[in-house]
Amino acid sequence: MTAPAAVGLRSERGPILLSVMVSTGLVAIDATVVATAVPSIVGDLGGYEAFPWLFSIYLLTQSVLTPVYSKLADQLGRKPVLLFGIAVFLLGSILCGAAWDMSSLIVFRAVQGLGAGAIMPMTVVIVGDIYTVEERARAQGYIASVWGASSVIGPTLGGLFAQLDAWRWIFFINVPLCLLACWLLSRNYHETLERRRHRIDWAGAALLTGALTLLLLGVLEGGVAWEWSSPTSIGVFAGGAVLLALFVLVERRAREPVLPLWIFTRPVVASTAALNLILGGVLIGYTAYIPTYLEGSAGATPLLAGLALATLTLGWPVAAALAGRLYLRFGFRRVIIAGTALVCATAAGIAVLSRWPSIWMIALILFATGLGFGFAAVPSLVAVQSTVAWEERGVASGTVMFARSIGQAVVAAVLGAISNGIVARLGGDEHAPATAVAASGAVFAASAVLAAVMCGLAFLIPRGVPTSEPGS
């Protein structure tokens, strides 16, 4: 086992860790910088009813290709896949900054998501490759520091650019960061790979993409572009269901399925994937709607609303840094249960208190919510990595990340439909304080229900999950 002193930026693996941290920062900053600028973007481009697509389409393209990227990483190595993801993320960021209306911005966010889909799983897998379970408890502190810094930098930049009517720079700021990440990876990360032939399940990926796109389209546009009971609505949902059924059939016969069925036979992997599916949904309910709620109901400036949201993403890395010590002492299951219980309690608090807008109260509760997310998300991912062999780690880690992204994409669509429906019923003025409170209150109530479900799923995680690698 590698000595504990070997974990850190000045150690032999330090340059690789730094490369991973910068790459993680790309997605970490993007997670909060867009949400804080939504009112400014809508004010410039219009299309409030379509703004949930800014999150759903990004998360959809990010998630559906995660399993494909994981397969390619086994064939080509982690480094080329990660560099490709950064390059695509860079292209998408430039295009988003040049968008001329809401429709073009949504399309370009899809491109950005294609790149992010490679970045997050590859950074997770690289950390799993170069550190043992015990070492990851310390390495997570460094990764957590990235999210902690991004939780302040992202909302600050987003709010500042929004107040200066320069929201396009929330995307252009990614350009130097992407170039820095590529340079660090090219210089510092060198891997050895036993190359073998793989068959990528393109049919499965295409069917999954098509199914999820239709289902999201039906949820977001139902009651807006067409009636819920109209033939168009029924046809869209039916088409999505048919493609999803075909996807399952293809996966059963594929030599290397994009979503291997053995995933569902491993209790630890299946239970943590289900938990992360709901976790992603609860998370998007806050990151997408807290800034809009505070600006519309409490009169907060974009900068102040962004800083309130930052407490959520600040609490997460604080807990992530502590979670390593706790799961080594108490086990993964207990720490995850405690984390989800904290999220459940704070989610109920936000739902109840949303009728009385208070920037400081929301910020305080969100910090506690972030702590809960950190205690749930990090141990669940490390638990999965500790129960699979090296050759399965990419797929297993990718599945958990895939589930979290799918949860975000689907729930973003559902919450968008709820919000749009309430705004339309109350006269269509999303900026009216009463309307903002009503719409956001419904979103937060739905998030609280999901948090309760997530807490229940935590109890399904098997007892006695090992805290060491298979065969170690």
Image: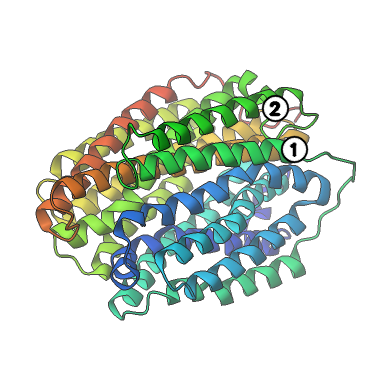
Question: What x and y, as percent, mark residue 274?
Answer: 49, 28
Mark 1 element type: loop
Answer yes or no: do the residues labelled 2 and 1 have beta carbons within 8 Å?
A: yes
> Which residue is tagged 1?
201
Question: Residue furthest toward the front?
Answer: 231
Mark 2 element type: helix
Question: What x and y, as percent, mark residue 77?
Answer: 79, 51
Horizontally, residue 21 falls left or right of residue 149, namely: right
Question: What x and y, as percent, mark residue 101?
Answer: 41, 69
Q: Amino acid at mark 2?
A: Glu
Asked which quadrant contains residue 390, the reply is top right
Q: Is residue 124 visible?
A: yes
> Which residue is tagged 2?
251
Q: Residue at x 86, y 52 (%)?
A: 192
In the image, residue 158 sits, relative to residue 259, either above or below, namely below
Q: Residue at x 20, y 58 (%)?
A: 294
The colour scheme of the drawn protein is rainbow
Give the quarter of the figure containing the N terminus: top right
Q: Amino acid at mark 1?
A: Asp
Q: Residue at x 62, y 48 (%)?
A: 121
Horizontally, residue 388 falls left or right of residue 440, namely: right
In the image, 373 versus 206, the foreground residue is: 206
In the image, residue 138 sits, relative to residue 83, either above or below, namely above
Tell me the CA gap for discs 2 and 1: 8 Å
Give the quarter of the figure containing the C terminus: top right
Q: Is residue 25 visible?
A: no
Residue density around tag 1, few if under 14, some if 14–19, many if 20 or more, within 10 Å: some
